Amino acid sequence: MLRLPRFRYLRPQSVAEAADLMAEHGEQAMLVAGGTDLLPKMKRGQMEAEILVGLGHLAELRQLERSDDGGLRIGAGVTLSQIVHDAALARLYPGYVRAAALVSSPALRNAGTIGGNLCVDTRCNFYDQSYEWRMAVGFCMKKDGDICRVAPASKRCRAIASSDTAPAAMALGATVTLVSSAGRREVPVSALYEDDGQFYLAKAADEIIESIQLPAATDWSSSYVKVRRRGSIDFPLAGVAVALKAAGPVIEEGRIVITAVASRPLDVSEAAEPLVGCTLASLLEGQRDELLTGVAASAARPAKPLDNADLHYVWRKQMTRRGVEQAVREAATALLARSA
Amino acid sequence: MNLSPATHDGQALHVVGKPLPRVEAVGKVTGGTLYADDIDLSGLLHCKLLRSHHAHARVLSIDTSSALAVPGVVAVITGQDLPARYGIMPTCEDEVALEHEKVRFVGDPVAAVAAVDEAAALAGCRAIRVEYDPLEAVESIEQALLSPGSEPIHDYAGPANIHRLAALEFGDVEAGFARADHIREDVFFFEGNTHLPMEQHSATAQAANGHVTLWSSTQNPHYVQRILASVLDLPMGHVRVVAAPHGGGFGGKCDPFSHEIVVCKLAMLTGRPVKCTLTREEVFYTHRGRHPVLMWVRTGVDASGRICAMHFRTALDGGAYGSYGPASTLYTGALQTTTYAIPAYRFEGARVFTNKAPCGPKRGHGTPQPRFALEVHLDKIAEEIGLDPVELRRRNYVKPFTRTVNWLRITSCGLEEVTDRVLEASRESRRERRPGHGVGFAVSSYMCGAGLPIYWNKLPHSECVINVGRGGVTLFCGATDIGQGSDSVLATVAAEELGLSPGDIRLVTGDTGLTPVDLGSYSSRVTFMAGNAARMAASRMRELIVAAVAEEEGCAPSEIEVREGKIGRLMFEEAAVLAEERLGTLSSHGSYSPPADIGGRYKGSGVGPSPAYSYSAAVVDLDADHCTGEVHVNKVWLAHDIGRAINELAVRGQVEGGVYMALGEALMEAQVYRDGLHKQPSMLDYKSLTFLEMPEVETILVETVDPEGPYGAKEVGQGPLLPVIPAVVSAVHDALGVWVDEVPVTPEKILKALDARAKGKEGRFGPKSFPDVPYPPLVKVTPPDAAAAAL
């Protein structure tokens, strides 16, 4: 079997201490909470760390509290399962909870955290392989090599953004709080990602996600559609998060974020503009199908799936469009139910 | 449910037929069972194999000196230490344990390191320097058939990279086509896939005093013993192979493997026990799984839908080595005739070498591919001539106790019954119509054990010894329980004969040093063959004890009742003491050899004959989405002619497992390559069904009570997989009106077929043509005459 390489495990007593340890050990160290992404990748030699700084045991990362503006602050160490089983959360942020519920399998959701899922490594079937396999095909720029195997002319890595909760959080306008030995800052979730499969996180290596802040969701509903081969376990082949605002029968604002069709989640909310002014009923009763098809087509236009994931990339692009239609309908259905 | 009355030959059955938990179940579900990788011996060394990074290359040099300098490394061997060639089939001994001249696929083993732990062994492997001269790699059937650019993959193959060719004709096929009212041709492709057992292969060897013992997760300890003796140059009696409790085989642990030979050699060299457990990725390279097969079939039917003639061509992608290839090739043509009475039949088959992991036997060995093609082809014929597809099949069903055109002996045959029962059970569902909803039907047949052994010999195929004494009842048999439940079958049969419970029988199985031979757990042979051997041994033991009791009681043996732990008025143990006092050691034996007249006498006739055939029929109910191409299977009904269920619970488990595997093959499993490498050698990326994709299975057992099976039993390990795959394809056609003539049926293929139809072309996805294969001249075989055809 594949064995985990030897490493030192450090168990800080606080987030501040964890940040100090990261600053102290620099590139030798990596953060670990649930370990569901990192540990298998260490076995395959995709990630090498001499020191792991543990976060999973820190109670301060597991808080869930109402913020003053009516939103919610969720500690980064809260597990995906906790989110999934929180009924109140599901009423307020159905898209986010749905996204969390569709991550991997129940066992992995019990260990995996929401902070970890935001940072989940980009994926590529030229990269998510053992050391020996990668050596045989030739190493790629994401690890040990210097070219992109799926797009050899590409100057950057084309690995795929694979977090389910990131697009859902972005559609809600969520922010994250980052802590490092230098201080603390709050940034939109969308600012967490770079358009680069290799250096995909726009945060310093020693910055720790402390919490995610979901803004108040009055008059909003949200949804998330995940495209994949099977009903469990698999990473997204395409993902669509939608949030719609409607105080009454008419849509006032819409946001769409697509994922797994580029190296970062793509905010394509401009594509939702035609939805503004539509009545929920007309959208759901099939009177605005052409408009919805148009929204889906323009939302999916920036999707550039390549041949580095399961199934055919043309199919993945088709499914992105369909995912947008489905996600818009689901969010509209929830709003209509609420107004009724 | 109500199976046939619990009697056999007029005798009441007490244990056979009962849905009892399997004898080894508690250990498996509580974690108590010790699998091959759980074996730990004092001083154990761990072995890792260095595998080729090239798909096809000459090995120029191997430098192991740096590996030996790695701390913890104890020994390093290469092909020079194990030069003997071997192969499971005597006709293609084309493997060596470690290649030192030429590698033929990414994953081909070239060196082995034994070290104090796995990490050191791995570091040792990475320190070995191998110099390669890369050669052009062959990646497809079409490419293999072309004259090779650099050099053929094997010297002994040819022309081009053709491993094996077969061309057989039974009856006058041209005359059959001439009298046909309707002729149709189709081309199909079945993608390769792998076994995916839960347990990776693992082997541990110990050597002392010129003897070697190997514990391995193997299906065939006897064949492994035979090949170890040959490769290690030891007398067979000095090699003991123990089949460890098994975490699944499905055909993937039927060959003798590099890691099994290597640990023996390293144990002999170091004097320490050596273990090698493969990683999941290595299991994908070890493979020996389902061959990718291209198929072309032409069938002529008369106006009433009766088949006049059939011509079936196959081309198999064998991967890098021979394995069971000659048999696999013939199996793609052998069993078309065991469901349909084809009066004139021509089969042409070819197997080619490619630079991919070697293919071999997987559940259904060589027959799921042609079964898929045949059943879908018949559906298309039925549609074309306007006949109900079930009716078309019924008009051509074989009859019980007949001989096929290729000389296979059919005995019990429940085809009509399985068809009736599966249609009856699924009737309500078939009535339901909604957009995207589809239902498909197909039938199949499988062997209950191969009629011939893998190497020529006249010895029994299965042997069994039973000892009774103060230690209780112990049954010794070489049969290997790979999870199919063969230990339970043996215990149940012995218990039935001796009036005991299965839990009263101690089993010693799958150990070539302790048990008489059984050829192995392949070709669905164990219940039929080892079951008959066990029954013979147990009934002989019963006769010994009953005779002693009858003599004591002064009555005829026929007056002594054997049941519920008693022999007449005595407890079994008391009766056994009485018998031992009179006869000395109580030991009995039984053996089984298949009848001689079950097949033909032509070249190639060794593949297909079996002492009996099981029959299955499936109905698949699914919804297919015309927008996404996604398929959701709602339910599968599977009726199976089991002959008699020795253990109803175990039989149902096998049916459900077969349906599960079939749906995986039908919908997603694919062993595919890119840039000469396996594209997804992991359980995350090689897709098989999760619980969420697995539908309800309604199993219907039909008992035809075979005249030669133990208590009438037939196989269930492989047959129920076969009809499910074509039934899925048929149901997708029923749902969306398009044919996907290529397995697996993925969403993109369905959308392409729908797209083709939308553009005014044929609503189909699949291969467009069949390649030119230089098949040899036909071997013309006279079919059995009317007298021989009716048994």
Image: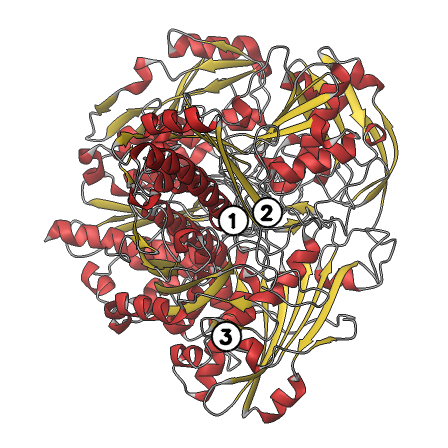
- Distance of mark 1 from mark 3, alpha carbons? 26 Å
Image position of B737 (left or right of A71): right
Give the image location of residue B422, x and y in percent: 32, 66
Q: Which mark is residue B529?
A: 1
The image shows residue B709, relative to residue B200, as above or below, that is below
Mark 2 vs mark 3: give the one in front: 2
Precedes in sequence: disc 1 or disc 3: 3
How far across and how far down the image is residue B279, in percent? Answer: 59, 31
Q: Say if mark 1 contacts mark 2, CB within 8 Å.
A: yes
The residue identified by callout 3 is: B340
At numbered mark 3, what does the secondary structure look like: helix, strand or loop?
loop
The residue depicted at 79 percent of the width and 71 percent of the height is: B776
Does dot 2 land on a helix, a strand or a loop?
A: loop
- Along the polypeptide, which appears first: circle 2 or circle 3? 3
Percent coordinates x, y for residue A187 in the rendering: 39, 28
Left-right relation of B585 to A222: right
Front residue of A1/B20: it is B20
Residue type at mark 2?
A: His
Residue B564 shows in this picture:
yes
**How far across and how far down the image is residue A262, in percent?**
52, 46
* Kind of residue at badge 1: Met
Give the side of residue A163 with respect to residue A253, left or right.
right
Q: Which residue in the protein does label 2 denote?
A: B461
